[in-house]
Structures are given as structure tokens and as C-alpha cells.
Image (cartoon, coloured by chain):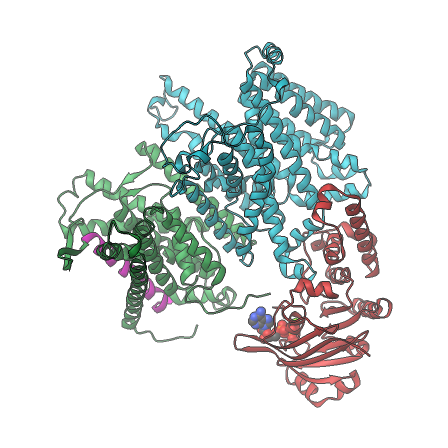
Chain colours: A cyan, B red, C green
């Protein structure tokens, strides 16, 4: 793999050859060991992430990388997840946001259309299942705030499976509807208009509890049904066995943790494959062409409107599917989830990873999600435990107790997102894993005529990073 | 001889400026013609109007017998007309081969569904398009290994050739070349001129050039149209145009072969 | 830029006249449409007389709309001037507004703590407010210059979306920076404009007789003050841009940076000054905003910023007169939609829809008339 050898740095060189593969394996095993010692440690999770990132970068055959990654994602994470379900939760969220980021990447990275209201499509999917998968239909003529309890649901839980494709269609349709009027707009105006659209959707979700109660307003919709688990997954024998392995009682709710984790990974996997195949097709080339120079692109026969609309539709479709899944996972949706901050956080994932770069975007999603729900939260926890104690803040000399709760790091997402955006734009606008490099590597591989099966295997690193 | 492209009284205005003023133009099928004139005369605007990037305020443009006024540029390209740009508009962050493949857009039958499902039809269409692109690369005189280079890393002369290959990928009946030898040295210009002739002689493509290099214009053109201040002031064979009093005035009155200005 | 003798008197009167025309014009048009709607919808409601309700509310709605319009117009100046020289949407402008607001409010809170505000009569109260506005201008102006220097200047010449994304980053960063500062110092992140002076008093203009009910048409001192500040700001800015050397330099940089540089203008300095002026105006608007709506928080600047951008686009971005017109129209529209949506729709659509209304306008204008109300038709370059 001379192509990769030249494009990796000296440090990664020690991971080449059979010895390198063994080294990577050792690292993965070491990480696993740290996690078994303390399944709850943040350090362990960060090491796990570093192992996945390392596996992506090392100069090894795709099949080797795939094997190593699959081992971590499909075996180690679920095994540790038995003892610490939070790990599965993080894995699920990374899968969700990586899928969203890949969708936004189609619009911003491939086609070059800056969409600042992207979260709206996620909202469409989520509210679709929230509305039909809960009892909200019975509530439409009730004013918000009345909590009548009904015995039945209008749609049984298994409809969930049908609503995933419906969510895809609804979001894609929405993408086209919103895309139509903005086709002619220049880049910066497009950004502002999509931001406006995103806000409009959120305000609507907040206010469509009257005249008829569609969204239940700011309170949100709950409970939303989860898809029924196959019987064998909840059989007492299986639960008992799992409990024995885990050293703690495992119930059906825990099984849902595994279920959503694997389902999330599955959808992410499909998304990666689709995004990758599109990127390397006629449509993908058309996207890049209109991003680079739309006049030249139309002069070469690329239909501008249709190409932009497909970008909007496909980008939206990804997040529509995840919206349905997310609503079921949370059993609750409310407008808060679909704020501008959420749209921007997905943009941060895309930019951090690398505009147009699929592995980069997945990696960016993992980093931002970890930062969001794990690192900042852990810091907040740490702070609040310090607050319980009598200690003084070093240097300042005032007790931790008196530190305002308003200073919790978890409340400062925007600060980190903002900083990341500025620094990336100034110092590394192409992202952590730039698209060009990735693309050139692909081409060189093609030149070596690697059979298709192996190219597929090359997908693996992206999938693994999802977690 | 049949006429492949016919402009009748085409007028294009930008606000108060009449960039193209009631221009008539007839291009015969299988010919090589040139459009010349001082900078800012309106030549590029004529090309932009023909290819559908601008819509003319007045007049008719017929391509292959049917009117193409108001037709979208990508549809016009699909009809069999393609062009290059005065200030080279390659897709800089795409590889050379990908650039040519974008040119083949209207001729590649693969679909998005095919791409996602990797159908046999898709793979076949992609493979054929790639081979064709590779062939075109060689045809315009570029080395085989160049396909995987990013377009922006190529020297100027090669970029011009890639642009021609990209245009050829749409299998045009008519190709419009906007100052294709600008910035080339004499050797490059000469070999480019040979290429233009080959396009017509081997491939049967009708060629229209905008050119400042009078050696190229006089050597290759069968007909020349002279534009000044948006109007056609003369037309004929090279010999006729050379002698035309108004052409001489237009060219001597202002500095003819000054630096090229960027296209707008 | 050829030399032109300016008549300073004219440079003051002209924007005044324009302002008056914009206010009167948009107020009349929007009131007329609203009254027409009220007449049309009258038969749909028997519980209340829509027309009468509309009329009773009208003066207050107009005054609210005009004060809001002034604030949008002043904030819009920041967008339009920066866009004029750099063709760049300064997403973080709303945060300059917010910083200005906090600066002014902190000063007043401090003065209040010293017991200086309680006793203030109208004259003294005016002095304190003016001081707060000035401080807001200084803080926001310097913040704008710093931001330009650190975050935007390194990106000049990069593809269009790059500085825009950085500006989004600046916006987020500034919001949470203020949140952090306030939380660390005060324990919470929002502040309240202290109450002082006779600003809540109303000046009754006249009384109308409505079916035997006397209705006072009155205006709060506060509103008068807001309008007065607004007029001074806008006229001063117009004077600065149209009648001074600095203004001339700004205009020539806006027209063509390269030529301006060749003529010996220090383009970097002019761009920094443009940010300074725009930021200072934003800071002033922030203090006025706080004065009007009392509460300030780190996220307060974002939505007004977006609306002021809408106003700038509505009037024709890059045009100062356009921003005044756009601000007025938007302020009035918002005030009217907040007041009448719910009455006209029998409570089905509340005042919350006023934001949707503003964004709707933004979207429609950008799509159908991106050059704005006052902008001429420009051909898009190929
Ligand atoms: N998009 C445009 N908007 C306004 N004016 C234009 C535009 N495109 C070209 N022009 C003007 O039209 C005239 C003809 O330009 P052009 O066709 O580029 O000349 P040529 O190619 O003959 O040098 C010039 O005066 C040019 O400034
Ligand atoms: Mg030209």
C-alpha cells in the first residue's frame, strides 16, 4: 500500500506490516482492559475513541482495519455496555449525529450549499413518529396542558418500522419544498434563509398546540412508543444469562439499549455506504462541479436546479430516518432539541471533520458528541462533587461551594462550538481529515485495481468511528 | 451546405450598455469560423448568449433548425453544443479525469439509484465513461498519467487542453472556443491549432473560435466575423476581412492585441 | 470620488426628511391595511367590535412600532456598512449589540448601587442614560474592531462561506463569553435595567371620543427618548458618511477596494473604522433595547440582529437610507403583527408568530427582490 504509506506520518509508520497490525491489536486489547477495570471511566471511553481513530489512520490493509474496528464496535462496546449502559447510549448518539452530519455534508460539503437550518429535517422525522407513535392524535382537540390518559395507541408499536421509510420520504419532501424557493439564492443569503426556515420550524413546533394541538407546544410529546422487541430478546433465560455476565440485573429496558445501539449503527452504516457511492457517481461529480463553479457546471450540461434539489432531498432524508429512531429512543420530543445550536453543532461536526470528507465527518461527529454529552457532562459532575466538599479553589482561594452553578461547563456548548468554528476557519478550513486526500487515496487504490469486496472493506473505519 | 447555428438580430443589454447589438451570424455545418474584435467588443457575451447563460433581449438563435432562446444552458449542451471559457473554468479541486466526466454528464446514462445499488448497468456506464474520458485525455494530447492529478495543479497550457477534452466529452456537434490559445507560447499555439483542425477533420465537429492571435485566425478560419462595439462590422473569408477598411480602422483605432480582460 | 462641496445643513435636513417620509409612509400604509382587515373581519366576531379595538390600540401600536423601527434601523446600519465594504454578513453583529447593552446596564446598576439614580430628575436621568449609551458604544465599538482584527481579517479573500462560518463562531463564542462573565461575577447571567427617572410617565397628546368613551392618546417619556436618540444616531451617521472625509473614504472603499488603495487610502484602517462605527451604533441600540425591554441576557442580540439584517436586506443591503426604511417597515410590521394577529385570528395565532412573520418577509424579499426595496435592478454576473 505505497499510496497510504506516503500519505501517513512517521509515527503511524510503526503500525505498518504484520508487526504494526499486532501493535494496533495490542492497543485495542489494552483499551479494552482499561474499560473492564472501570467500565465507567471517561478515560476508558476516550481511549476507546483514540483506538478507533488510530485504526482508521494506520497503514494497514482495509480488511485488517475492518476486522480491528469491528472487534471494538461490535464486541467490546456491547460487552462493556452490559456493565455500563451509558457506553451504548453514547454509541447510539454518535451514530445518530454522525448520520445527521453525513446528511448535512451532502448539502454543505458535496454541493457547497450552506444550510443553517438543517436540524429542521431531523425534527420532521422525529415529530412524524412522535405524532403517530404516541397518543397525540387523541389530543388534537384538547387544549395543551390537559393530560387525559387513553388506553390505546392509534398506531401499534410495530408501525415504527414503516415510519422509518415514511420519515425518509417526509424529510426528503420537505427538503425539496424548502429547496425550491432558495435555489436561486447566492451562498450567504442561502445560509440566512435556511436559518430562518429552521427557526420557523422550531417556532411552529412550539406554537402548534393551538388552534389544533399537533405538537403539544413547548411541553413536547410523550410517551412515544418503541418498536416491539423480538420475543427471544426478552426471554427470561436470556435476561438471566446476561445478568450473570453483567453482574447486575438486566431488564428489557437494558435490552433496548443494545437494540438502539445496533440499529443506529446499522442506519449509519447504510448512510455511509450510500453517501460514499453517491459521492463517487455521476451525481456526486455534479455536486462537486456546482460547488466549484456553477456556471461552468451548467455549461457542461449539469442541471443546476435538479442537482441542488437532490442534494437537499438526500441530505434531509438521512436525518429524517434518524429523527424517527431518535423519537422512539427518547420516547419524548420537544422543540428544544431542534434549536439553532443543534443545527450549528452539526455544522461544527462537518467542518471539524472536513467538508466533503466522509470519514472526517464521522470522526467530527464522534468528537463533538463526546464533547457534548460526555466530556462536558463529566466535568460538570466533577465540579458538582467538588462543590459538595469543603475544598478551596486553587489560586482564587474561595471555596468550591461558592462557585455559581451557572458556571457548569455543560452549559457552555456554544462557547466551544464557536471557538472550534473560528479556529478551524482560520487555521485548518479543510478539517481534520481533508476530503482531497481521501479522494486521492481512493483514486490511487482504484488504479491498483483492488477487487470490489475490498473497497467495501475500506468502509469499515468510518463505521467503526461511529462509536 | 446546411447551417448548424444561426443568430438573427440578437441583442443583449446590461442595463444601459448594449453589449451585443442586433448581430446576425450563420455558421455552416462542418466549418471552422472565427469571431474577432477588440477587447470588450462583446464576443464573449455572444458566446454566453448562444449557450444560454444569458437570455437575449431580442432576436432568435437557432441550433440545428430549432430555436434555443430561453432554453436552459444544460439543455442546450445536451442538444450537442459545448464550449470553453476565456478565463479557464475548470473544477479546480476535481481530478482531470473527473473534470472530463462532468463534461460527459449528458452522455452518461447512470442514475443515482444505480449508484447506490451498484447495479451492473451503473458499473458498466461508469466504466465506459471512464474509458472514454481516458481516450479524450490522450486525444487532446495530454499524457496518460495525468488523469488523477487535481486540475488546479496543472500548468496553464494543459488546463486549456483539459477544458477542450471536457467539452468534447459531451459529444458536441458544435464547439465554441473562447480565446483557446491565450497565454500559450508559439509552439503550444501551433499544436493547439492542429488540434482544432483535427476536431473538424477527424470528428466532424463544427468549430467557432474567438481569437486574438491573427496568425491562428487567418491560418485556420474559413469564415471570419468581426465584432466591434457589439455590432458585426464585417464578415467574409480571411482575405476579404483583411482588406476591409472598417476592420483596419477598428483595429488600428484602438490597441487590438492588448492584454485579455476577464470574462463577465 | 471627486470633490464635492457639501452643505452641512443639507446633510442634516435630508436624512431627517427621509426619516419622516419613511415613518409616515410605512405607518400610513400598514395602518390602512390593518384597518381594512378589521373592517373586513368585523362580521366574523360578535363578542367584540374588531374595528373599535383596532382603533383603540392603534396609537400605542404605532409608537411601539416606530421605536422598534428605530432600533432595527440603527442595528441594521452595522450590517449594511460592513456589507458595503466587505460583502460579508457579519453574523456576530447582534452580539456587539448585546455587549453594548450589558455595558450600559452594568453602569446604571452600579450608579444605582451608589444611590445616584433614585433622586434623578428628568435632566439628570437623561445625563445618566446618555452616559450609558456612550459606554455601550465604546464597548461594542472596540469589541467590533477587535473581532475584525482577530477573526475576520485573516480570512479576507477566502471563499465567501469561510468568513461567514467564522462569524457564526464569533457569535456563539461571544454569547457564552458574556454568559461566563456574568455568571462568574453575578452568579446569574441576566441583568435588569434599573428603574429610575420619570420615564414611565405619559404625555397625553390628545383625547378622542370613541362611542362616548374618552380614549387618551398618550406617549411615554421613554418612547420619546428612544425616538430622540434614534433620530440623533441616524442623522449623525448620515452626516458622517456623506459629509466628512472619513465618510468619503468609506464610500470609495465600498465602491472599489483596489482603486481606493491606489488612491492612497489605507483600506485596512477604513475597514476597521467601519467596524468601529457599526459596532458603536449597535452598542447604542443595545442600551436603548435594554431601556425599552428591561431585561438583558447573553442571547438577547441574536434575534434582533437577524431582524435588523432582514431590515437591511429589505431596504437594499449596502444602502444606509435603505436600512432606515427597512428598519421602520420591519419595526411597524412586527408591532402590528404582535398586536393584531391574535385579535384577527380569534386567538388561534398568538404574538409568537411575529418572528415567523419577520423571517417570512426575509425569505420572500431574498427570493423575489434580493436587491431590496430601494436597490436598483442588478444583473447577476456569470
Ligand atoms: N455580466 C455583465 N454585466 C455587465 N456588463 C457586462 C457583463 N458581461 C459583459 N459585460 C460588458 O459587455 C461588454 C462586452 O464584454 P465581452 O463580451 O466580455 O467582450 P469581449 O469578450 O469581446 O472582450 C463589456 O463592456 C463588458 O464590460
Ligand atoms: Mg472575451
Looking at the picture, tell me which residue is in the foreground, C41 or A265: C41
Start-end of magenta stretch: C221-246
Using the rendered image of the protein, determine whether residue A364 is visible from the camera's viewpoint.
no
Q: Residue A332 vs residue A161: left or right?
A: left
Picture quarter with ligand 2: bottom right
- Residue C309 is drawn in which quadrant? bottom left
Q: Position of residue A38 (x, y in %)?
A: 56, 15
Q: Quadrant of the C terminus of chain C?
A: bottom right
Q: Residue at x 58, y 75 (%)?
A: B57
* Residue A186 belongs to magenta span: no
- Residue A212 is drawn in which quadrant? top left
Looking at the picture, tell me which residue is in the foreground, C59 or B105: C59
Q: Position of residue B191 (x, y in %)?
A: 82, 67
Which residue of the protein is positioned furthest toward the bottom in this rendering?
B245
Q: Position of residue B253 (x, y in %)?
A: 64, 85
- Residue C311 is drawn in which quadrant? bottom left
Q: Is residue C356 shown above or below B185?
A: above
Amino acid at each position: 500500500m505505497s499510496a497510504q504509506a506516503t500519505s501517513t506520518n512517521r509515527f503511524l509508520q510503526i503500525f505498518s506490516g504484520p508487526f504494526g497490525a499486532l501493535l494496533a491489536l495490542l492497543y485495542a486489547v489494552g483499551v479494552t482492559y482499561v474499560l473492564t477495570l472501570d467500565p465507567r471511566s471517561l478515560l476508558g471511553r476516550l481511549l476507546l475513541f483514540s483506538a478507533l481513530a488510530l485504526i482508521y489512520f494506520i497503514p494497514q490493509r482495509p480488511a485488517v482495519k475492518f476486522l480491528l474496528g469491528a472487534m471494538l464496535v461490535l464486541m467490546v462496546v456491547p460487552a462493556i455496555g452490559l456493565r455500563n449502559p451509558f457506553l451504548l447510549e453514547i454509541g447510539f448518539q454518535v451514530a445518530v449525529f454522525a448520520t445527521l452530519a453525513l446528511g448535512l455534508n451532502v448539502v454543505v460539503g458535496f454541493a457547497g450549499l450552506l444550510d443553517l437550518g438543517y436540524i429542521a429535517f431531523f425534527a420532521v422525522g422525529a415529530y412524524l413518529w412522535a405524532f403517530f407513535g404516541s397518543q397525540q392524535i387523541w389530543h388534537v382537540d384538547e387544549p395543551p396542558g390537559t393530560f387525559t390518559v387513553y388506553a390505546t395507541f392509534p398506531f401499534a408499536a410495530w408501525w415504527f418500522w414503516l415510519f422509518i421509510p415514511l420519515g425518509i420520504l417526509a424529510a426528503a419532501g420537505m427538503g425539496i419544498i424548502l429547496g425550491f424557493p432558495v435555489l436561486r439564492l447566492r451562498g450567504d443569503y442561502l445560509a440566512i434563509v435556511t436559518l430562518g426556515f429552521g427557526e420557523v420550524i422550531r417556532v411552529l413546533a412550539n406554537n402548534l398546540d393551538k388552534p389544533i394541538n399537533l405538537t403539544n407546544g413547548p411541553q413536547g410529546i410523550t410517551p412515544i412508543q418503541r418498536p416491539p422487541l423480538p420475543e427471544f430478546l426478552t426471554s427470561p433465560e436470556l435476561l438471566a444469562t446476561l445478568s450473570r455476565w453483567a453482574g447486575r440485573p438486566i431488564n428489557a429496558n437494558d435490552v433496548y439499549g443494545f437494540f438502539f445501539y445496533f440499529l443506529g449503527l446499522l442506519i449509519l452504516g447504510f448512510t455511509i455506504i450510500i453517501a460514499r457511492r453517491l459521492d463517487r457517481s455521476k451525481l456526486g461529480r455534479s455536486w462537486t462541479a456546482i460547488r466549484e463553479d456553477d456556471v461552468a457546471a451548467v455549461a457542461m450540461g449539469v442541471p443546476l436546479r435538479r442537482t441542488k434539489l437532490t442534494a437537499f432531498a438526500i441530505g434531509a432524508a438521512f436525518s429524517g430516518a434518524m429523527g424517527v429512531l431518535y423519537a422512539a429512543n427518547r420516547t419524548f420530543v420537544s422543540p428544544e432539541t431542534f434549536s439553532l445550536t443543534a443545527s450549528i453543532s452539526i455544522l461544527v461536526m462537518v467542518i471539524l471533520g472536513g467538508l466533503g470528507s466522509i470519514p472526517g465527518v464521522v470522526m467530527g461527529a464522534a468528537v463533538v458528541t463526546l464533547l457534548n454529552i460526555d466530556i462536558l457532562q463529566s466535568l460538570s459532575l466533577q465540579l458538582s462533587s467538588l462543590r459538595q466538599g469543603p475544598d478551596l479553589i486553587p489560586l482564587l482561594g474561595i471555596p468550591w461551594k461558592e462557585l455559581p452553578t451557572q458556571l457548569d461547563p455543560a452549559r457552555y456548548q456554544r462557547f466551544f462550538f464557536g471557538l472550534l468554528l473560528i479556529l478551524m476557519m482560520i487555521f485548518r478550513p479543510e478539517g481534520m481529515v481533508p476530503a482531497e486526500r481521501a479522494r486521492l487515496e481512493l483514486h490511487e487504490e482504484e488504479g491498483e485495481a483492488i477487487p470490489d469486496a475490498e473497497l467495501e472493506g475500506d468502509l469499515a473505519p468510518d463505521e467503526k468511528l461511529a462509536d | 451546405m446546411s447551417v448548424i447555428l444561426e443568430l438573427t438580430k440578437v441583442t443583449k443589454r446590461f442595463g444601459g450598455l448594449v453589449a451585443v447589438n442586433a448581430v446576425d451570424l450563420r455558421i455552416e455545418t462542418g466549418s471552422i469560423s472565427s469571431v474577432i474584435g477588440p477587447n470588450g467588443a462583446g464576443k464573449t457575451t455572444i458566446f454566453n448568449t448562444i449557450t444560454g447563460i444569458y437570455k437575449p433581449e431580442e432576436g432568435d438563435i437557432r441550433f440545428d433548425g430549432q430555436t434555443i432562446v430561453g432554453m436552459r444552458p444544460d439543455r442546450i449542451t445536451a442538444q450537442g453544443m459545448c464550449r470553453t471559457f476565456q478565463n479557464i473554468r475548470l473544477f479546480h479541486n476535481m481530478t482531470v479525469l473527473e473534470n472530463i466526466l462532468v463534461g460527459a454528464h449528458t452522455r452518461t446514462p447512470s442514475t443515482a439509484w444505480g449508484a447506490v445499488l451498484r447495479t451492473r448497468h451503473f458499473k458498466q456506464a461508469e466504466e465506459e465513461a471512464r474509458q472514454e474520458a481516458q481516450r479524450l485525455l490522450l486525444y487532446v494530447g495530454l499524457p496518460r498519467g495525468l488523469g488523477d492529478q487535481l486540475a488546479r495543479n496543472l500548468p496553464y497550457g494543459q488546463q486549456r487542453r483539459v477544458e477542450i477534452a471536457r467539452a468534447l466529452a459531451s459529444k458536441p456537434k458544435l464547439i465554441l472556443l473562447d480565446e483557446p490559445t491565450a497565454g500559450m507560447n508559439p509552439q503550444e499555439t501551433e499544436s493547439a491549432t492542429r488540434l482544432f483542425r483535427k476536431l473538424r477533420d477527424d470528428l466532424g465537429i463544427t468549430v467557432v473560435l474567438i481569437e486574438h492571435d491573427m496568425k491562428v485566425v487567418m491560418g485556420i478560419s474559413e469564415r471570419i466575423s468581426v465584432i466591434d462595439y457589439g455590432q458585426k462590422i464585417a464578415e467574409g473569408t480571411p482575405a476579404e476581412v483583411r482588406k476591409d477598411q472598417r476592420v483596419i480602422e477598428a483595429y488600428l483605432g484602438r490597441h487590438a492585441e492588448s492584454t485579455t480582460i476577464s470574462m463577465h | 470620488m471627486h470633490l464635492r462641496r457639501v452643505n452641512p445643513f443639507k446633510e442634516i435636513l435630508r436624512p431627517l426628511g427621509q426619516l419622516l417620509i419613511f415613518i409616515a409612509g410605512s405607518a400610513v400604509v400598514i395602518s390602512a391595511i390593518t384597518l381594512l382587515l378589521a373592517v373586513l373581519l368585523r362580521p366574523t366576531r360578535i363578542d367584540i367590535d374588531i374595528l373599535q379595538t383596532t382603533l383603540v390600540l392603534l396609537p400605542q401600536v404605532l409608537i411601539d412600532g416606530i421605536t422598534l423601527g428605530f432600533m432595527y434601523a440603527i442595528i441594521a446600519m452595522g450590517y449594511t456598512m460592513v456589507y458595503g465594504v466587505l460583502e460579508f454578513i457579519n453574523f456576530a453583529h447582534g452580539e456587539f449589540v448585546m455587549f453594548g447593552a450589558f455595558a450600559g446596564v452594568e453602569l446604571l446598576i452600579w450608579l444605582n448601587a451608589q444611590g445616584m439614580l433614585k433622586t434623578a430628575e428628568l435632566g439628570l436621568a437623561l445625563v445618566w442614560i446618555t452616559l450609558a449609551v456612550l459606554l455601550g458604544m465604546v464597548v461594542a465599538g472596540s469589541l467590533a474592531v477587535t473581532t475584525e482584527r482577530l477573526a475576520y481579517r485573516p480570512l479576507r479573500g477566502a471563499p465567501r462561506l469561510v468568513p461567514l462560518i467564522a462569524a457564526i463562531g464569533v457569535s456563539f463564542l461571544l454569547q457564552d463569553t458574556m454568559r461566563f462573565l456574568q455568571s462568574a461575577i453575578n452568579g446569574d447571567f441576566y441583568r435588569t435595567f434599573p428603574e429610575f427617572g420619570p420615564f414611565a410617565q405619559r404625555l397625553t397628546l390628545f383625547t378622542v371620543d370613541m362611542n362616548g368613551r374618552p380614549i387618551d392618546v398618550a406617549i411615554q417619556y421613554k418612547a420619546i427618548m428612544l425616538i430622540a436618540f434614534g433620530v440623533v444616531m441616524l442623522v449623525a451617521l448620515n452626516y458622517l458618511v456623506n459629509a466628512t472625509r472619513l465618510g468619503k473614504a468609506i464610500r470609495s472603499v465600498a465602491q472599489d477596494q483596489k482603486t481606493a488603495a491606489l488612491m492612497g487610502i489605507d483600506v485596512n484602517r477604513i475597514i476597521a473604522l467601519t467596524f468601529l462605527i457599526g459596532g458603536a451604533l449597535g452598542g447604542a441600540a443595545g442600551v436603548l433595547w435594554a431601556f425599552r425591554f428591561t431585561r438583558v441576557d447573553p442571547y438577547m442580540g441574536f434575534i434582533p440582529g437577524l431582524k435588523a439584517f432582514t431590515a437591511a436586506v429589505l431596504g437594499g443591503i449596502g444602502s444606509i437610507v435603505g436600512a432606515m426604511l427597512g428598519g421602520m417597515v420591519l419595526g411597524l410590521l412586527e408591532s402590528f403583527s404582535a398586536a393584531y394577529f391574535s385579535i384577527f385570528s380569534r386567538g388561534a395565532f398568538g404574538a409568537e408568530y411575529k418572528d415567523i412573520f419577520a423571517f417570512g418577509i426575509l425569505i420572500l424579499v431574498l427570493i423575489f427582490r434580493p436587491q431590496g426595496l430601494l436597490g436598483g435592478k442588478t444583473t447577476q454576473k456569470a
